[in-house]
């Protein structure tokens, strides 16, 4: 890997999982238009997130990274609000239980692209390009709908901009007030079959808020109780889109990918000699990298050296996705190797992607028990190695979908068809997500 980097140097490397755009001239025009647009986020915001993630790397905070598997251009304002609400609900539970700050990062305002195991899909006698996310093509199965369309890159930018505007309004305009979020959790407790299990914690949170208010500590006197820091992230899959939104910071001269505060590299594109590692090593955003069950210690250490050679705390998050039955055996050697090499990474657990299977009815799904089992194994591995289990990374929605089995409502195979709405991978619904937060909170309490 050359020491010379530029926003376009990735083009000299193999770039996997890129669309086959049918018209290169049309693509170039779209990218030129995209490069002339204002940044979606700012370098200073990305630096703030790096500082907060440094606290996670030091064991002084916890990361909650959550959102949709693949965002839709058609998501309503209500759907975006409900996704944010679930993340805030989870955050207040985790913050109270752990007694430490929570860093909140959404898979939102940019998670439009998805890698697929095959470049084509066959239905009957018809073979067409696979659906790669609405930034590339459409989920409908026709030749016109599956044609990669460069104009969708501009649509993704515009959609991300409007989503960001909405998120900024919600997180600073009172919607994220701590007492309001606590009341949402109270509603969850009251209606959940597992409500009695969680009632004690909810009561404690309410009493703490009442005490603080009586002491004059509220949203009027402490803005942090009235608004929250909320950051965006997505997988940096389409490199020409990411390059077009990369800007040089006028204050520092450093390069930032201004499509999101945090970018990550997926399990399928983390090759050390690949284009994705080459591109992201040169931008100064906080970065993530998925680490699956086949990752070796040499590969993980190589990623640490390539993406964070200066060993800056908060710069790199390793997002483990090994599977419920593999994490307790496969993770400890990686934890030990990274710790012994002195790399100050954030370790986060993605309990979703290693636990996907096809149910009897044909729906791709995940079981809540497997999700929780992998998180529990993640915590156990860190306890074994004396390292900090820094966070969780989950796919969820605020909508009342039936895509994942189990949880406090006990969803079974026959329930999946009732509201199976995902465009790609199965997501936890709002109730399952809050349920998971309470379970993770118990693990944090045990760790404390």
Image (cartoon, rainbow, N blue to C red):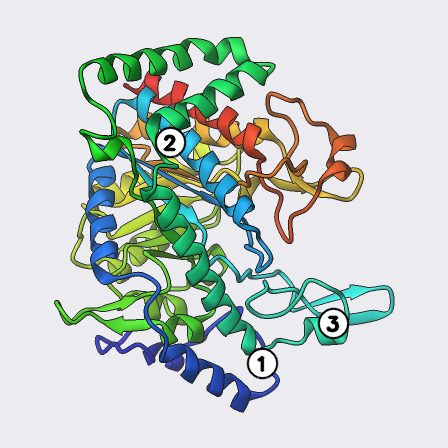
Which circle, 3 or 2, is nearer the viewer?
2
* Relative side of 226 to 23, left or right: left
Identify the mark nearer the N-term, 1 or 3.
1
- Which residue was labeled with disc 2? 91
The vertical placement of 290 against 398, above or below, is below
Secondary structure under badge 3?
strand
Cα separation between marks 1 and 3 = 14 Å
Residue 370 found in image quarter? top right
> Residue pushed farthest bottom?
25
The label on residue 21 is 1
Task: Between residue 29 and residue 300, name the one nearer to us.
Answer: 29
Cα separation between marks 1 and 2 = 40 Å
Tell me which residue sits at (80%, 39%) in the image: 361
Cα separation between marks 3 and 2 = 41 Å
> Is residue 94 visible to us here?
no
Tell me which residue sits at (58%, 17%) in the image: 191
Q: Residues within 10 Å of mark 1 (few under 14, many from 20)?
A: some
Tell me which residue sits at (33%, 72%) in the image: 38
> Residue pushed farthest left?
251
Q: Residues within 10 Å of mark 3 (few under 14, many from 20)?
A: some
């Amino acid at each position: 890997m050359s020491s010379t980097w530029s926003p376009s140097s990735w083009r000299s490397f193999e770039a996997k999982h890129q669309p086959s755009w049918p018209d290169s001239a049309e693509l170039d025009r779209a990218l030129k238009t995209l490069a002339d647009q204002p940044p979606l986020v700012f370098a200073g915001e990305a630096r703030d997130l790096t500082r907060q993630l440094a606290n996670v790397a030091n064991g002084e905070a916890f990361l909650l990274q959550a959102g949709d598997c693949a965002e839709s251009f058609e998501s309503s304002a209500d759907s975006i609000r409900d996704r944010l609400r679930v993340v805030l609900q989870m955050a207040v539970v985790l913050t109270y239980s752990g007694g430490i700050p929570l860093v909140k990062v959404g898979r939102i305002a940019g998670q439009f692209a998805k890698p697929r195991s095959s470049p084509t899909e066959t239905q009957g006698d018809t073979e067409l390009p696979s659906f790669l996310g609405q930034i590339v093509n459409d989920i409908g199965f026709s030749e016109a709908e599956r044609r990669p369309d460069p104009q969708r890159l501009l649509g993704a930018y515009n959609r991300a901009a409007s989503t960001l505007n909405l998120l900024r309004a919600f997180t600073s305009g009172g919607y994220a007030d701590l007492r309001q979020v606590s009341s949402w959790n109270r509603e969850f407790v009251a209606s959940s079959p597992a409500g009695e299990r969680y009632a004690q914690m909810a009561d404690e949170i309410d009493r703490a808020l009442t005490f603080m208010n009586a002491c004059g500590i509220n949203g009027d006197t402490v803005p942090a109780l009235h608004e929250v820091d909320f950051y965006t992230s997505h997988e940096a899959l389409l490199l020409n889109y990411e390059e077009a939104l990369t800007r040089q910071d006028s204050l520092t001269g450093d390069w930032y990918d201004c499509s999101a505060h945090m970018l990550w590299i997926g399990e399928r594109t983390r090759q050390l000699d690949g284009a994705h590692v080459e591109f992201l090593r040169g931008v100064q955003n906080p970065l993530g990298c998925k680490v699956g069950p086949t990752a070796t210690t040499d590969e993980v250490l190589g990623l640490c050296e390539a993406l964070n050679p200066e060993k800056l705390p908060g710069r790199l998050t390793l997002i483990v996705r090994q599977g419920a039955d593999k994490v307790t055996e496969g993770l400890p050697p990686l934890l030990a190797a990274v710790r012994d090499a002195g790399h100050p990474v954030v370790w986060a657990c993605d309990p979703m992607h290693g636990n996907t299977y096809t149910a009897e009815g044909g729906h791709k799904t995940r079981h809540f028990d497997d999700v929780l089992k992998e998180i529990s194994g993640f915590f156990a591995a860190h306890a074994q190695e004396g390292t900090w289990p820094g966070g969780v990374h989950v796919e969820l929605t605020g909508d009342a979908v039936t895509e994942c089995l189990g949880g406090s409502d006990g969803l079974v195979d026959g329930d999946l068809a009732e509201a199976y709405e995902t465009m790609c991978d199965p997501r936890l619904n709002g109730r399952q997500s809050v349920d998971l937060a309470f379970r993770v909170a118990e693990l944090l309490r045990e760790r404390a």
